[in-house]
């Protein structure tokens, strides 16, 4: 599996660290336990396209949002995670 | 038909003409008292114990492919009961006891081989952890022995004792651990369940779960709708997708684990050894192939194949532990899709939907659990409450905080 880092170009997946689902957003510190439970534990776990976080650990060290098909490993898009809406 | 020595002798004389099907191939009935979704080891064992222990025989197992096409036929066949936590250890020991009587119980040769499982350690800290685990096992009445370097050398002389980075400081040995023939476990449970009246229906994928007023009433399948009093899910690797049909969202990610077999060689290793340096385990099959594996690939996957970096990682660990394998050829490798739960432990429980039960989250340790998982899941379904052995394996433990965290590492779907 090869991932095209927007900063470094196409690299082997072994340069990257996987961190799972990109869509869940961290609740506010005082949010209800249920919201934290959902954020920490529950996952959609789809068979198909999935937005996930990878860090280019052995490259530019940027966090990336990779949209990948979990049934074929085909990658649709890669973007710097800082460019996501609602993230500062 | 019962299998016996006499029977084999008779069939040998008759050219094998009397061997029939080992289980029927029935068409689905319109309604069952209980439907088990998933014809892996766990689903088939559940159906068997529903019939045997609870007298429930109007039961069907629905399998989307052929039985054993999932992880039951893809694992490295290691069985053991060397767990640390009270929520786990009695359950796995119950499984070990069922393994010990399984062949007589099923009238099928599942090739249970108690050749021992040895977990190596390489530092003072890992020795302490192994000693603690061994003590926990013995407190539960389970066999465990702490071996020093010399005792390991006597037990398994073939490994490299001169590894400078990961010296062999000893190992934790469970002599009653070992291996079993995975396909035979599937076939044995299928045949034994069938003989008690259970319908095993293959090529029948569940595509929907019909819930009315909070209660499950039927499943939709590729062979039409089938009514059900109760539905038990045992879909290892696909639990999230099937549970979502009933509106449930699970604390699970699906990941791929690879396994490997070398070309056949003369007897070299007569036990199961795990290398504590990274994550690596190896045994030798009766055909002579070395059977080994390591970590999960590490990203969500529903593809039953892995990638090269992990192949390299596992091969490196293999050669570090057994340098003489460096010139062996790898015969086959494959992958299986597993439920990785958020604390590394399984779920056997009721669900918020009445009549719907969940058996999931086995990570890559569920083969050894097959007998006890079926036994406990059958109890939970038939009695509508958990048995003491699976009481801690609750679905709501992530919300309440009562997780079973063997590694002590917190929520992460890459444990165990
Ligand atoms: C490479 C590898 C090595 C492993 N090594 C070990 C080991 O050494 N020791 C150990 O204890 N464990 C090991 N495991 C883990 C173990 O194999 C699993 O935990 C266990 O097999 C899971 O239970 P099962 O047998 O019921 O699963 P499976 O055999 O996967 O059964 C689930 C079944 O559900 C079916 N299914 C899914 N969706 C549907 C649907 N919608 N409708 C109908 N049917 C459906 C699937 O087709 C499948 O047959 C390993 C796993 C892998 C992948
Ligand atoms: Zn980069």
Image: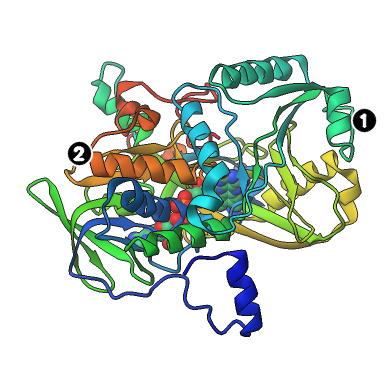
Residue B222: % across, % down? 28, 72
Residue under numbered circle 1? B162
| Mark 2 neighbour class, 10 Å CA radius: few under 14, some 14 to 19, many 20 or more | some
Q: Is residue B160 left or right of residue B141?
A: right
Chain of the residue under label 2: B
Name the image quarter holding the C terminus of chain B: top right
Residue under numbered circle 2? B352
Determine the secondary structure under disc 1: loop
Q: Which mark is residue B178?
A: none
Is residue B89 depicted above or below B190 in this figure? above
Of residue A11 and residue B330, the one placed in the foreground of this image is B330
Chain of the residue under label 1: B
Specify which label sits upstream in the sequence, 1 or 2.
1
Residue B48: % across, % down? 38, 54
Residue at (31, 17) in percent of width and height? A29
Residue B6 seen in render: yes
Q: CA distance from mark 1 to mark 2?
A: 55 Å
Q: Based on the displayed image, in which of its 4 quarters is residue B172 positioned?
A: top right
Residue at (89, 40) in percent of width and height? B158
Number of callouts: 2
Residue B179: % across, % down? 65, 47
Residue B143: % across, % down? 64, 26
């Amino acid at each position: 599996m090869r991932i095209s880092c927007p900063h470094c170009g196409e690299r082997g997946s072994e340069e990257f660290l996987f961190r799972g689902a990109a869509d869940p957003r961290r609740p506010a510190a005082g949010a209800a336990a249920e919201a934290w439970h959902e954020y920490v534990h529950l996952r959609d776990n789809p068979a198909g396209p999935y937005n996930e976080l990878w860090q280019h650990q052995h490259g530019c060290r940027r966090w990336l949002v990779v949209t990948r098909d979990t049934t074929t490993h085909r990658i649709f898009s890669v973007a710097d995670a800082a460019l996501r809406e609602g993230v500062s | 038909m019962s299998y016996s020595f006499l029977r084999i002798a008779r069939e040998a004389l008759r050219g094998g003409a009397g061997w029939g099907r080992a289980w029927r191939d029935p068409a689905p009935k319109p309604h069952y008292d209980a439907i088990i979704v998933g014809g892996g080891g766990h689903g088939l064992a559940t159906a068997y114990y529903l019939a045997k222990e609870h007298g429930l025989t109007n039961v069907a197992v629905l399998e989307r492919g052929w039985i054993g096409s999932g992880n039951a036929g893809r694992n490295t066949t290691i069985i053991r009961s060397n767990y640390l936590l009270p929520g786990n250890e009695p359950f796995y020991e119950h499984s070990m006891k069922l393994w010990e009587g399984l062949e007589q119980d099923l009238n099928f040769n599942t090739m249970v081989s108690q050749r021992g499982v040895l977990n190596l350690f390489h530092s003072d800290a890992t020795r302490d952890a192994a000693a603690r685990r061994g003590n926990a096992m013995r407190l539960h009445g389970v066999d465990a022995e702490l071996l020093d370097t010399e005792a390991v050398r006597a037990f398994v002389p073939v490994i490299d004792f001169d590894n400078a980075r990961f010296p062999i400081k000893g190992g934790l040995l469970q002599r009653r651990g070992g291996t079993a023939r995975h396909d035979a476990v599937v076939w044995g449970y299928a045949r034994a369940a069938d003989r008690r009246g259970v319908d095993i229906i293959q090529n029948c994928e569940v595509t929907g779960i019909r819930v009315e007023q909070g209660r499950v009433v039927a499943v939709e399948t590729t062979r039409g709708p089938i009514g059900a009093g109760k539905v038990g899910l045992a879909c290892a690797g696909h639990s999230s997708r099937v549970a979502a049909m009933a509106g449930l969202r699970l604390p699970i990610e699906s990941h791929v684990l690879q396994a490997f077999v070398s070309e056949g060689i003369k007897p070299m290793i007569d036990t199961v050894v795990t290398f504590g340096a990274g994550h690596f385990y190896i045994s030798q099959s009766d055909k002579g192939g070395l059977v080994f594996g390591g970590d999960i690939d590490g990203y969500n996957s529903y593809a039953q194949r892995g990638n090269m970096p992990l192949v390299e990682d596992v091969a490196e660990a293999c050669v570090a532990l057994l340098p003489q394998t460096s010139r062996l050829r790898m015969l086959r490798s494959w992958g299986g899709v597993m439920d990785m739960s958020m604390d590394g432990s399984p779920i056997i429980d009721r669900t918020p939907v009445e009549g719907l039960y969940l058996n999931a989250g086995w990570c890559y340790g569920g083969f050894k659990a097959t007998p006890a998982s079926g036994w406990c899941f059958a109890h939970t379904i038939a009695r509508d409450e958990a048995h003491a052995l699976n009481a801690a394996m609750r679905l709501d433990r992530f919300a309440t905080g009562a997780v079973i965290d063997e590694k002590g590492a917190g929520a992460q779907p890459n444990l165990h």
